[in-house]
């Protein structure tokens, strides 16, 4: 419990520092072309990293956790060098061709905004290489059960970047902010590098290498498909008035804090308990554990949403309603957050239901379901955006996430758990 609380506090602090970084950029530069270009430039690197880092963690941690010290060092160096080399090659290709594909992702941007987006995207691609390496290092530390050290690395690097931002932003503008994001990921690599241990030449044909590739392929295919949601959002939001893309991104980031803290503090700690109960066929206890956490999280998020409706706009005005951010910007941000109720409530509760499947060792059911619902969701999102704009986009996102949550609950209670009970 002590470790869970510590991790939750560190995770929350890390997210807060990241939000402060973005808050400072927005309040100093205002909501407009520069911030739109910065957040649009993050889209592809973040998509690739989200897909790969999630898959790497699921695959590498169990593989490395069972290895002896010599094999652990050998394969750790192999994964680190292999992933770093792969992402370096990918970054070079994307860097050279950015002038072509970036414009396709933001068709609503002006010519000047597209040029700036290309420049900032190229900077983010350098950060992508470091962050990919960090994903491997995270997995290595998790396999050693050194979870707190990983969170501390994020806090130190983010804190340094935030401190430097105050000096760099007035001189170099939004380009300086992008460079500090690269700096942040590079510091994390340096902080975590000792986890590899002394140098040992990798064995590229080892059993761990072969197993990792076999296990990661299905995860990459499924995750890569429905994680393209961020690209669709950037594509559509680029056609909104200047600053619209930034406001949508900020709203999602604020709600993302709840999802991450929910995963760290509520969902992740219940997985071992669920696994033990599933293995012992104690399905009454299994249901009790996940239902209690689901109801608790639902109650907390609903309470937070009610507070958002009544006092949210005033709080947002206090937090960001100054500098280059106008009252109209804050009002639109509040409306987007109200419309994104599903991102807040269903998104957080969905973390619990997803982890419940994983607690039974079932990763395929939620993945298959998400692929089907996502396939229906994308055309609906496009149609609604062209008719109702950003607020319509937020509403259809909420409907999608509530639908996912309901379907997961129906599958759990009506099919998956009863099937396990029958043996």
Image (spheres, rainbow, N blue to C red):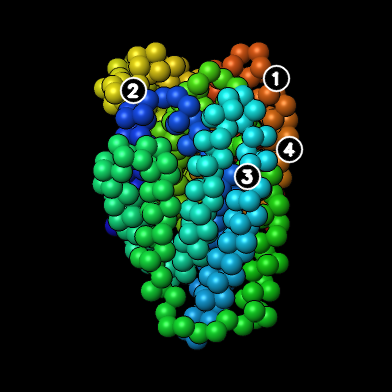
Mark nearest the camera among 1 and 4 is: 1
**Residue 344 visible in the displayed image:** no
Identify the residue position indicated by label 1 in the image. Answer: 383
Q: Residues within 10 Å of mark 3 (few under 14, many from 20)?
A: some
What is the spatial separation of the Cα atoms under label 2 and label 4, in whole angstroms? Answer: 42 Å
Q: Nearer the viewer, residue 133 or 216?
A: 133
**Residue, x 41% and y 48% (percent of image)?**
179
Mark nearest the camera among 3 and 4 is: 3
Q: Residues within 10 Å of mark 1 (few under 14, many from 20)?
A: some
The mark that comes first in sequence, 3 or 2, is: 3
- Label 4: which secondary element: helix
- Residue 302 lies, in percent from the top left, at 42, 26
The mark that comes first in sequence, 1 or 4, is: 4
Quarter holding the N terminus? bottom left
Quarter holding the C terminus? bottom right
Q: Residues within 10 Å of mark 2 (few under 14, many from 20)?
A: some
**Residue, x 38% and y 43% (percent of image)?**
176
Identify the residue position indicated by label 3 in the image. Answer: 98
Identify the residue position indicated by label 4 in the image. Answer: 372
Q: Is residue 86 above or below residue 399?
A: below
Q: Nearer the viewer, residue 350 or 254?
A: 254
**Residue, x 71% and y 41% (percent of image)?**
371
The mark that comes first in sequence, 1 or 2, is: 2
The mark that comes first in sequence, 3 or 1, is: 3
What is the spatial separation of the Cα atoms under label 3 and label 4, in whole angstroms? Answer: 31 Å
The mark that comes first in sequence, 3 or 4, is: 3
- Label 1: which secondary element: helix
Q: Which image quadrant is residue 156 in?
A: bottom left
In the image: residue 185, left or right of residue 63 = left
Identify the residue position indicated by label 2 in the image. Answer: 324
Q: Are marks 3 and 2 in contact (CB under 8 Å)?
A: no
What is the spatial separation of the Cα atoms under label 1 and label 2, in whole angstroms? Answer: 32 Å
């Amino acid at each position: 419990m002590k470790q869970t609380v510590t991790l939750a506090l560190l995770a929350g602090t890390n997210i807060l520092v990241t939000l402060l970084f973005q808050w400072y950029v927005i309040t100093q530069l205002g909501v407009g072309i520069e911030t739109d270009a910065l957040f649009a430039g993050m889209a592809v690197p973040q998509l690739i990293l989200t897909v790969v880092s999630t898959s790497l963690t699921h695959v590498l941690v169990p593989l490395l956790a069972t290895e002896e010290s010599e094999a652990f060092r050998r394969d750790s160096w192999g994964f680190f060098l292999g992933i770093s080399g792969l992402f370096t090659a990918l970054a070079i290709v994307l860097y050279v061709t950015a002038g072509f594909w970036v414009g396709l992702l933001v068709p609503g941007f002006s010519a000047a905004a597209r040029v700036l987006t290309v420049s900032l995207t190229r900077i983010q691609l350098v950060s992508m290489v470091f962050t990919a390496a960090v994903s491997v290092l995270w997995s290595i530390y998790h396999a050693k059960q050194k979870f707190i050290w990983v969170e501390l690395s994020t806090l130190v690097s983010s804190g340094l970047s935030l401190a430097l931002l105050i000096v760099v932003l007035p001189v170099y503008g939004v380009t300086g902010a992008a460079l500090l994001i690269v700096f942040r990921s590079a510091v994390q690599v340096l902080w975590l590098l000792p986890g590899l241990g002394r140098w040992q030449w990798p064995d590229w044909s080892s059993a761990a290498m072969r197993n990792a590739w076999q296990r990661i392929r299905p995860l990459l295919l499924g995750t890569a498909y429905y994680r393209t949601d961020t690209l669709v959002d950037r594509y559509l939001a680029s056609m909104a008035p200047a600053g619209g893309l930034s406001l949508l991104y900020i709203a999602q980031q604020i709600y993302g804090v709840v999802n991450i803290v929910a995963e760290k503090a509520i969902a992740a700690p219940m997985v071992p308990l669920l696994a033990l109960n599933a293995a012992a066929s104690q399905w009454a206890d299994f249901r009790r554990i996940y239902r209690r956490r689901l109801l608790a999280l639902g109650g907390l998020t609903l309470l937070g949403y009610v507070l958002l409706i009544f006092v949210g706009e005033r709080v947002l005005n206090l937090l960001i309603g100054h500098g280059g951010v106008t009252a109209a910007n804050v009002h639109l941000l509040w409306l987007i957050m109200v419309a994104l109720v599903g991102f807040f409530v269903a998104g957080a509760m969905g973390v619990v239901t997803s982890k419940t499947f994983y607690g039974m060792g079932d990763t395929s059911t939620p993945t298959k379901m998400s692929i089907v619902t996502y396939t229906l969701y994308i055309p609906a999102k496009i149609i609604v955006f062209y008719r109702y704009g950003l607020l319509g986009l937020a509403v259809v996102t909420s409907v999608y996430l509530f639908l996912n949550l309901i379907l997961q609950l129906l599958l759990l209670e009506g099919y998956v758990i009863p099937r396990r009970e029958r043996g």
